[in-house]
Image (tube, grey):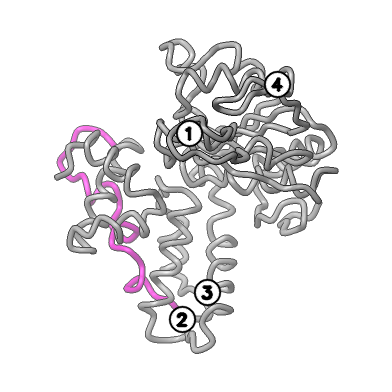
């Protein structure tokens, strides 16, 4: 594998030893059908890894079906997953669920920690026995499907608190993959930023920006990126939109990238934690978009629900 890899295997620009080791594990896991649990902070690229595992496997010609657990209402989730029979509820017609739609392919549970306990038990049966019943049905169906899952929270902690089934955790955690945060692979920051700049240029024929000024590159490398790769991509898109010349200067970057933690937290007795920086950046984004929740969520690369939860956690009005 090359020092900076952007291949059908990786789909990622990386010279980081941590990422190179991860990509080797992904390559090995493409050859098997065991469940895989992908863990890492929000924005580190868990969805991309799931796509690599599927599209590099023998199941590539079958569907990869994604289940974004936080976005499906609890009362609809069971039907969405397992389907339902005609008459299962008022006006119900027979419907195939995502488990059946993923037959011979892969079923990817994004943010599986949000899956309610009742459905965790049913998913465990799918993983272990490859069997399930539709909602309102009595016939047991069999399905050949590989289960992939991702989580941005520590599932072992969720197991200890009783929020996640221990047996399902162990069944999914056969070969765990941990995506390192961007702050732990700083050698990837500028190559990734240049990749995102190239992609923005492709999308925008009239784009003037072609490169980062040295001081802008230094700011990109020095920022801790609490939102990881997703935040970096949003910052580059913003810079392209605001750049007034071929070289992107610091003026086109978010203010939080220019100010050092020492400046932001002058007078404090400690250095800011990642949580401190995330809170500050969320406040900054909300100020820049005049409190528009939809736009703020887009800039941050998260859902409105996730933004609401973070605001509540940090006490941000």
| Picture quadrant of residue 46 | top right
Per the image, the residue denoted by label 4 is: 140
Per the image, the residue denoted by label 1 is: 77
Per the image, the residue denoted by label 3 is: 200
Q: Does the residue at mark 4 contact the one at mark 1 (Cβ under 8 Å)?
A: no
The Cα–Cα distance between marks 4 and 2, rounded to whole angstroms, is: 62 Å
Residue at 32% across, 36% down = 275
The Cα–Cα distance between marks 3 and 4, rounded to whole angstroms, is: 49 Å
Pick whichever of labels 3 and 4 is earlier in the sequence: 4
Determine whether the residue tagged by mark 3 lies in a helix, strand or loop. Answer: helix
| Above/below status of 138 relative to 285 | above
Question: Where is residue 290 drawn, in percent x and y?
Answer: 18, 63
Per the image, the residue denoted by label 2 is: 247
Pick whichever of labels 4 and 1 is earlier in the sequence: 1
Question: Where is residue 217 drawn, in percent x and y?
Answer: 47, 65
Provide the residue span drawn in magenta. 248-272
């Amino acid at each position: 594998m090359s020092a900076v890899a952007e291949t059908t295997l990786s789909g990622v620009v990386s010279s980081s030893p941590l990422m190179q080791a991860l990509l080797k594990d992904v390559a090995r896991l493409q050859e098997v059908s065991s469940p895989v649990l992908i863990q890492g902070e929000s924005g580190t690229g868990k969805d991309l890894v799931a796509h690599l595992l599927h599209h590099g496997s023998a199941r590539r010609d079958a569907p990869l079906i994604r289940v974004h657990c936080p976005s499906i209402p609890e009362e609809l989730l069971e039907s969405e997953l397992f389907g339902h029979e005609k008459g299962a509820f008022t006006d119900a017609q027979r419907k195939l669920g995502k488990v059946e739609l993923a037959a011979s392919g892969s079923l990817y549970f994004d943010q599986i920690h949000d899956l309610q306990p009742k459905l965790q038990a049913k998913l465990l049966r799918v993983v272990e026995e490859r069997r399930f019943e539709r909602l309102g049905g009595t016939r047991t169906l069999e399905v050949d499907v590989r289960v992939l899952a991702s989580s941005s929270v520590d599932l072992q902690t969720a197991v200890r608190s009783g929020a996640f089934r221990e047996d399902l955790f162990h069944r999914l955690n056969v070969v765990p993959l941990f995506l390192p945060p961007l702050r732990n692979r700083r050698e990837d920051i500028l190559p990734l930023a240049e990749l995102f700049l190239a992609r923005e240029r492709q999308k925008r024929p009239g784009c003037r920006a072609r490169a980062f000024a040295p001081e802008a590159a230094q700011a990109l490398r020095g920022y801790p990126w609490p939102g990881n790769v997703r935040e970096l991509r949003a910052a580059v898109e913003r810079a392209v939109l605001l750049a007034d010349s071929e070289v992107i200067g610091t003026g086109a970057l978010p203010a939080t990238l220019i100010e050092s933690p020492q400046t932001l937290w002058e007078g404090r007795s400690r250095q800011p934690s990642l949580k401190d920086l995330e809170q500050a950046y969320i406040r900054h984004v909300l100020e820049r978009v005049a409190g528009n929740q939809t736009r703020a969520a887009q800039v941050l690369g998260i859902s409105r629900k996730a933004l609401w939860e973070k605001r509540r956690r940090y006490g941000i009005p």
